[in-house]
Image (spheres, grey):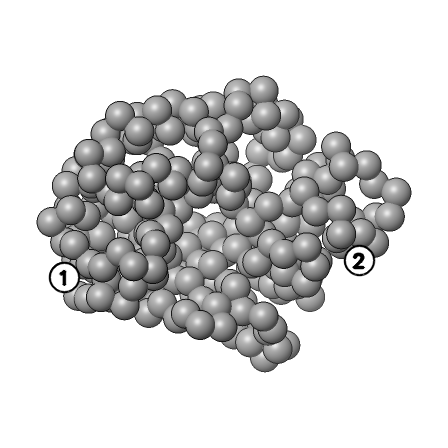
Amino acid sequence: MNSDATPPTGGRVYVGCSGWAYPAWKPVFYPEKLPAKKFLEYYATRLNSVEVNYTFRSFPRRTAIDSWLAQTAEDFRFSFKAPQRITHFQRLQDCGPTLEAFDGAIAPVADAGRLGPVLFQLPPNFKADEARLAQFLADAKSCRFRIAFEFRHESWFDPAIYKLLERHNAALCVAESDDLATPDVATADFSCYRRRKTEYSEAELAEITANLQKRAQRGDVFAYFKHEEEPTGALWAAKVLAAVRGQA
C-alpha cells in the first residue's frame, strides 16, 4: 500500500479519532507548546480523518467548517455523528425535515469533496424495526451524505436488515467496545469501524490493519478509535495508519 493509504484497486483507508480538541494529549501526541488553535492542523499531519461527535447535539457552524477545511489537506475526511433528534428523540420516524437541515449544514464539506460517512448511532433500547428503517432510508435518499448505522441492540443483527442496508448502500458500522461486538458484515461500497475497547494489543492492532487493507479492496474504509482524555486512542490510530501506509 502506498503512502496515501490507497490500495492498487478499490478505495482509501481513513483512520482517526472521534475528536481532536484534547489538551491532555500533550505531550505524548501533541507537542507540549502547541496552542489549541493548532490542534487540528497538527492532528491532520498524523491522521487523515476525524469523526465530529458534537453534531450529535448541535449543527456545526459554517465558520467552524470553513476553519476545519482550511486547516487540513485535500485528502483529509470529516465524518459526522447524526443529531440525537433523529436517532434518540424521533427514533428514525418522520425525520425528513431534520435530515434536510443537517444535510444543508454539512454541505460545505460535501462541496469540498471532503465528506466521510454520517454515523447514525441508535440507543441501546431501540429494537429492530425493519419497516421504520426502510422508511427512514427512503426519506434519506435525497441527502448527499453516505450513511452508516451503529446498532446497539442485538435484534438488528439480522440478514433481513443487512439486505435492506445493501439496497440503500448504507453501511453497518462495525462497532466494538469491552461490552459490544458488531458482526463484521459488508452492506455498502464503503466501510465504517468504531474501535472503543479499553486496550488493544500489538497483535490486535496488526489484525485491525490487515482487515482495513482487505476492506479497502471493496471501497473507502473509515476507522475511528476512542477519543478519551488519554491520548491512547490517537496513538493507536496513528500506529494503524502508519502500518496501512507501510511506514510502521
In the image: residue 93, left or right of residue 110: left
In this rendering, is residue 164 above or below 95? below
How many tags in the picture? Answer: 2
Residue type beneath disc 1: Ala
Q: Is residue 101 left or right of residue 157?
A: right
Please state if 167 lies on the left or on the right of 204 as rendered: left
Quarter of the rendering occupied by the N terminus: bottom right
Q: How far across and down, in percent of the image, does residue 88 sit?
A: 33, 45
Residue at 33 percent of width and 69 percent of height: 183
Give the residue number, with chain letter if any, for mark 1: 160
Disc 2 residue type (three-letter): Val
> Could you say which is closer to the camera, residue 74 or residue 86?
86
Task: Classify residue 123 by image quadrant.
Answer: bottom left
Dot 1 alpha-carbon crowd within 10 angstroms: few under 14, some 14 to 19, many 20 or more: few
Q: Is residue 110 visible?
A: yes
Residue positioned 75% across, 32% down in the render: 37
Mark 2 near mark 1, Cβ–Cβ under 8 Å?
A: no
* Crowd tier of the residue under label 2, counting other residues whose Cα lies within 10 Å: few below 14, some 14–19, many 20 or above: few
Q: Determine which residue is flagged by label 2.
A: 28
Which of the two discs, 2 and 1, labels the residue nearer the N terminus? 2
Quadrant of the rendered image containing residue 9: bottom left
**Which residue appears at 26% of the width and 39% of the height?**
90
Instruction: Give the percent coordinates (x, y) of residue 116.
Output: 45, 41
Real-space CA distance between mark 2 and mark 1, rounded to the nearest whole angstrom? 45 Å
Residue at figure coordinates x 14%, y 54% from the top left: 130
**Residue 101 shown left or right of residue 227 in the figure:** left
* Residue extending farthest top: 63
For residue 100, what is the image quadrant?
top left
Badge 2 marks a residue whose secondary structure is: loop
Q: Report helix, strand or loop for mark 1.
A: helix
Point out residue 84 in the picture as x, y percentages from the top left corner: 38, 41
